[in-house]
Image (tube, rainbow, N blue to C red):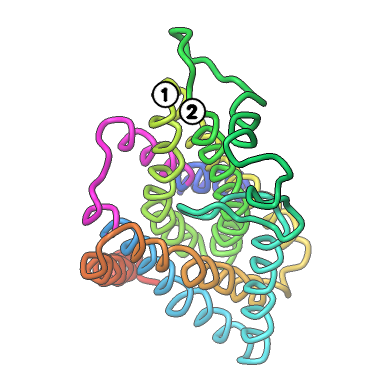
Amino acid sequence: MFENLNPLVNILLLSLMASLGTALGGLIATIRKPGRRFYGFLMGITAGVMICLAFLELVQQSIELSNWVTATIGFGLGASFMFVLDNFAPHIRFGEREVRQEQVKVDECPCDQETYAQRKRNQWRFLNKTGEDVDHSLVSTGLLLAIGITIHNLPEGFSVGAGYLHSPQFGVFIAVAILLHNIPEGIATALPLCKAGICKRDAVKVAFLSGLAEPVGALLASIFLTRFMNLLPGALAFAGGVMVFITLDELIPTARKYGSGSYTALGIIAGSMFVFVLTGIFGV
């Protein structure tokens, strides 16, 4: 990227560039709400990028640098890591709230459902800049979804750092692919906040801040891997496992549920083709 700069600085700049995708997505959400077809297409592109990037690049590079045993273990650890985060960290998936068994359900509350709902509405009160009430549930959804995306962006930043240490061109390639992947995530974060009545500028800020976990993950990975370069092949496969889990567990199911199935398929194909084109451009 910049040959005279320290590799850590380059990794920081690349991961910061990739993280701007969430801000771009947030901006798109404030301008115009995407329809089902367009949303399904966007999420499909995201899924196609992640799947191809994981299998054709990250895992393949891991095998070439080491062997299939290291790649297999790294891939499994990455998927398991995301499984643990997904089930034990408080957040919201794309489009649906995660409810734990120990949480009290509405129909189990000793009071009637209407009273319970009223109490929940009165528990917190949000006002926008004009002094009007905003929807508390939608605010919570947007903020918890931002937390979920932040959780995902940490290990995605890890892949940028590991990729750059393997090869600067490979790091740029991963960063550009993740930039595209982050756009629908920014849309998903900003939409419920806009619907709730939050200022559009603040909704974009939340989407932007959720992406800043990526540079943090990239730097942490880089500092660690520069001291333990022998772990680099496993780290690439680890990042691949993370991406595949996110894609299969959230991106594709959400795209089919809230978008259009056929347009989701077209998006997956388009995202895959985008990775093929990047592979040719960067020669990786």
Q: Can the viewer see residue 277?
A: no
Please give the name of the residue rendered at 23% of the width and 53% of the height, measured from the top-left corner.
38
Judging by the rendered image, the residue that carries numbered circle 2 is 135
**Which quadrant would the C terminus be assigned to in this image?**
bottom left
- The picture places residue 4, in percent across and down from the top left corner, at 54, 44
Query: Taking 141 as reference, is 220 left or right?
Result: right
Q: Amino acid at mark 1?
A: Gly
- The picture places residue 179, in percent across and down from the top left corner, at 41, 51
Please give the name of the residue rendered at 34% of the width and 57% of the height, measured from the top-left corner.
258
Q: Can the viewer see residue 189?
A: yes
Query: Taking 31 as reference, is 60 left or right?
Result: right
User: Is 87 contained in the magenta span?
Assistant: no
Q: Which residues are magenta?
A: 19-40
Q: How many marks?
A: 2
Alpha-carbon neighbours of circle 1 within 10 Å: few (<14), some, or many (≥20)?
many
User: Is 34 contained in the magenta span?
Assistant: yes
Element class at badge 1 = loop
Element class at badge 2 = loop
- The picture places residue 97, in percent across and down from the top left corner, at 56, 52
| Distance of label 1 from label 2 (alpha carbons) | 7 Å
* Disc on the earlier residue, 1 or 2: 2
Image height of 170 relative to 117, above or below: below
Return the residue nearer the eye: 235 or 37: 37
Judging by the rendered image, the residue that carries numbered circle 1 is 197
